[in-house]
């Protein structure tokens, strides 16, 4: 896949902390329950930590009790890209920032109580929260 924002690994390393680089550029994950945005409840927008693209509105965030911030849909169609992930002995759908290709988390069809039935399980370290002013 190609993305509008493209940088070398060295350029990303200069822009991101080691943990951000591990999650965003190497498809790592943060430990469940440790993310700074897990309990964020203010109104606002969640952006990609790497390129600042708008990804999720706070109005779509819900507590899925999974240990990571969860949303039922991206802000706009085309805000995220999807890739089949066969790592860890299972098949999942990886969610990437459609602007820079950074790993955000995974999406699961296990939220029937939400409008879309989807649970976008995102890493806090992949996101930057901008509260409404």
Image: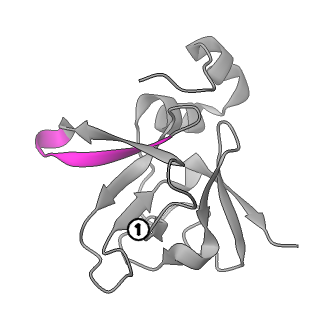
From the image, give the main secondary structure of the stretch colored magenta. Answer: strand
SS under mark 1 = loop
In percent of width and height, residue 48 lies at 62, 46
Q: Nearer the viewer, residue 2 or 24?
A: 2
Residue 128 left/right relative to 69: right
Is residue 98 depicted above or below 66 in this figure?
A: above
In percent of width and height, residue 100 lies at 57, 31
> Is residue 114 shown in magenta?
no
Residue 18 left/right relative to 30: right
Residue 22 left/right relative to 37: left
* Image quarter of the N terminus: top left
In the image, which residues are magenta? 88-97
Q: Nearer the viewer, residue 67 or 117?
A: 117
Q: Residue placed at 40% from the left, 61% from the top?
A: 121
> To which residue does mark 1 refer?
67
* Image quarter of the C terminus: bottom right
């Amino acid at each position: 896949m190609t993305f509008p924002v493209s940088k070398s690994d060295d350029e990303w390393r200069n822009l991101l902390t080691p943990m951000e680089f591990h999650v965003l550029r190497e498809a790592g994950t943060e430990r469940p329950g440790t993310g700074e945005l897990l309990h964020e409840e203010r109104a606002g927008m969640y952006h990609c930590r790497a390129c600042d693209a708008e990804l999720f509105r706070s109005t779509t965030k819900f507590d899925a009790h999974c240990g990571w911030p969860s949303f039922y849909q991206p802000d706009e169609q085309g805000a995220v890209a999807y890739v089949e992930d066969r790592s860890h002995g299972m098949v999942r759908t990886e969610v990437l920032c459609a602007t820079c290709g950074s790993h955000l988390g995974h999406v699961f069809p296990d939220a029937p109580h939400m409008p879309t039935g989807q649970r976008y399980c995102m890493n806090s370290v992949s996101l930057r929260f901008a509260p409404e002013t």
